Image (tube, rainbow, N blue to C red):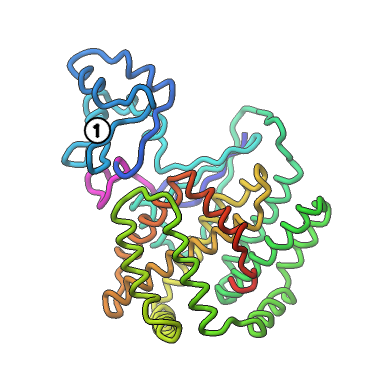
Amino acid sequence: MQYTIPDYYKEFTCIADKCEDTCCAGWKIVIDKKSLNKYKHVKGKFWFTMLKSVDWIRGIFRQDKEKRCAFLNDCNLCEMYANLGEKSLCKTCRLYPRHVEEFEDVREITLSVSCPEVARILMEKKEPVRFLTYEKEGEEEYEEFDPFLYSMLVDARDAMLGILQDREHSLKIRVGLILGMAHDLQGRFNREQLFSCEEVIERYQTKSARKFVRKLWKEEKPSVQERWEMAHKMFRELYELELLREDWDMLLMESEELLYSHGADAYKGISSDFKRWAKEERNIQIQAEQLLVYFIFTYFCGAVYDGRIYAKVQMAVISTFHIYELWKARWIKNEGELTPEEIVELVYRYSREIEHSDKNLERMEKMLLRDRLPWYRG
C-alpha cells in the first residue's frame, strides 16, 4: 500500500484551547459504527453525559444552540477526551484535520486548511510544497476502478503541480496552462481517447504552450465590464451552497458590497490597487500558489470516480479566486492593510464552508459543469 503526504505534514500539532477557533463547532460530527457501539457500553458517572450528548439514531454528537458539540466545554476542550482519554475519540475526531483520499492500493493524506493551524503553516510556507511517498504492506482491489485512467490522472497532476510551482512565470500563465491541459484531457476522456492524453500532458509543459497561452490571453482579454460581471457572478454562486455557519453569509454580503456594488470601473480600480499592493507583498502570490497546489493535489485524482477532470481544476482555480477576493475585500475594509492573521482566517473560513460539506463540493462541480468558463480566462 502506497501512502503520500505533504512535506509539512509532521509540522502540525493540534494547539487545542490556544486555537482561535474550534473544529468542534459549526458542523455535525458523524460517529463511526465502532465508536458508537463503544459509547453504548461506557460505565461510571460519565455514562449519563454520554447518553444525553449523543444522537444515537442519527449517529452524531448533539449540538447546542450555537452549533457547538455537546462535549465541548467553555475552554474549548473536549470533556470526553478529558474523562475517557484519547482512545475514546471517534474516527472523525481522531483523524481531523487529516483528509484521506482512497484509491486502489493508494492512500493520499493531506491536512485540511479548514484547521486554522494548518492554514497558518501553509500560508507561512515560502518554498514549493513537496509530496513524500512511502509504502506499507497490504493490497486491495476496487471493483470498477480504472487503473489506466488513474495512472493518467496522476501523470497529469504531477505535470500541473510542476507548472504551478514554476515561479519564473506569472501565476496567470500557470493557471491558464493547467486549465488548458484539463480542458483538453476532458475532451480526450469524453471521446474515449485516453491513449492520446500523454501527448496533451507533454504539450502543456513546453515553451510554445506558454507562448500560446500568453498570446491567447492578450487576444481574448475580457473587457472591464465582462470581467466585473464574471467575477460578480462567480462570487454570487457561493450563496447557492449549503450554509454551515451563520456568520459566513454575513462575510459574503460584506465582501460583495465592498467589491462589486460600485460597478465595473470601481472594481477595476480596486483590483489594480490591490494587485500593486500584492506585488510589493510577494507572499500573496506564493500563498495563492500554495492554495492552488493544495486543491489540485487533494481533489484532482478523484476524477477517476466521476470523470470530472476539467471541473476539478476549475474548482481549484475558482476556490483560490474566491479566497483572493475575500482577501481583497478585507484589504479594502482595512483601508489598504491585510495582516497575516487575516489571510489565514479567510482561508480556513472558506475551507470550512466548502470542504466540510459533500453537498457543497458536489454543487460547486455541477455549477462548473453548468456554467463552464473559457479556460484561457482563468
Q: How many marks?
A: 1
Give SS at disc 1. Answer: loop
Query: Residue 137, percent across and down?
Result: 61, 28
Query: Residue 70, percent across and down?
Result: 24, 33
Q: What is the magenta segment's predominant secondary structure?
A: loop
Query: Residue 310, percent across and down?
Result: 65, 58
Judge whether 10 appears above or below 287 on screen: above
Was residue 207 drawn as part of the magenta stretch in this picture?
A: no
Please give the range of residues in magenta.
12-24
Query: Residue 344, percent across and down?
Result: 35, 60
- Residue at (48%, 63%) from the top-left corner? 320
- Residue at (47%, 61%) from the top-left corner? 237
103 relative position to 350: left or right: right
Judge whether 31 appears above or below 252 on screen: above
| Location of residue 76 (image quadrant) | top left
- Residue at (64%, 69%) from the top-left corner? 375
Q: Which residue is more in the foreground, 350 or 202?
A: 350
> Looking at the picture, which amino acid does disc 1 mark?
Ala
Was residue 21 drawn as part of the magenta stretch in this picture?
A: yes
Q: Quadrant of the C terminus?
A: bottom right
Judge whether 369 appears above or below 79 on screen: below
- Residue at (69%, 56%) from the top-left corner? 156
201 relative position to 338: left or right: right
Residue denoted by label 1: 70
| Location of residue 219 (image quadrant) | bottom right
Q: Which residue is more in the foreground, 203 or 114?
A: 114
